[in-house]
Amino acid sequence: MTLAQRFVPGEAPARRDDKPDLDSPARIEAMVDSFYQRVLDDPLLAPVFLEVARIDLDEHLPLIAAYWKKMLLGDTAYDRHMIAKHRAVHDKQPLTGAHHERWLALFTANLQEHFSGPNTDRARLLAARVMDNLYRQLSQR
């Protein structure tokens, strides 16, 4: 906080950029779309998604958006068990630490480039926790 800023109870501090927060379904959908553009351009992750998991983007992207809407906005539409889905992929081709690290790096870079605010910070934290948990779950098999 600079001398020009004043703390006012109940008011959020002024944002330092004009990037939107992940505070609406439309913004979460935009985040998912821009993230998956990165994933599908990535030489390590694209084959896992397209050749091993054989995802159908028209089905997959709305599911992932629903997951983030649940986590960030409290929406209740997402009710799947993501660990089971990832185990099935892992059984076909092991998902290594390199896969998890790349996913998290791309996710974080996407947030950094396009979004800012409390929900964005929460998404960054949740993504790290999800990757840590997923890696531990898959490594224990």
Image: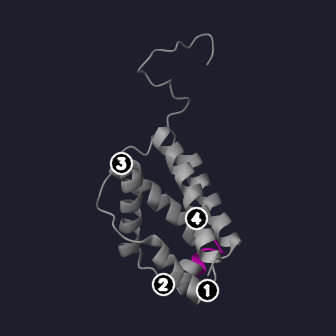
What amino acid does circle 3 point to? Answer: Leu
Residue in view at x 61 percent, y 74 percent: 45
- Marks 3 and 4, Cα distance to the nearest angstrom? 21 Å
- Marks 1 and 3, Cα distance to the nearest angstrom? 33 Å
In this rendering, the label closer to the viewer, 2 or 4? 4
**Side (left or right) of 68 relative to 137:** left
What amino acid does circle 2 point to? Answer: Arg
Q: Which contiguous range is marked in magenta?
A: 42-47
What amino acid does circle 4 point to? Answer: Asn
Image quadrant holding the N terminus, namely: top right
What amino acid does circle 1 point to? Answer: Gln
Give the image location of residue 101, x and y in percent. Answer: 67, 64
Closest to the observer, 80 or 35: 80
Q: Which residue is label 1 attached to?
A: 93
Q: Residues within 10 Å of mark 1 (few under 14, many from 20)?
A: few
Q: Residue furthest front?
A: 140
Mark sitting earlier along the chain (2/4): 2
User: What secondary structure do most residues of the magenta stretch adopt?
Assistant: loop
Q: Which residue is label 4 attached to?
A: 133
Is there a contact, CB below 8 Å, between mark 3 and mark 4? no
Classify 69 as above or below 92: above
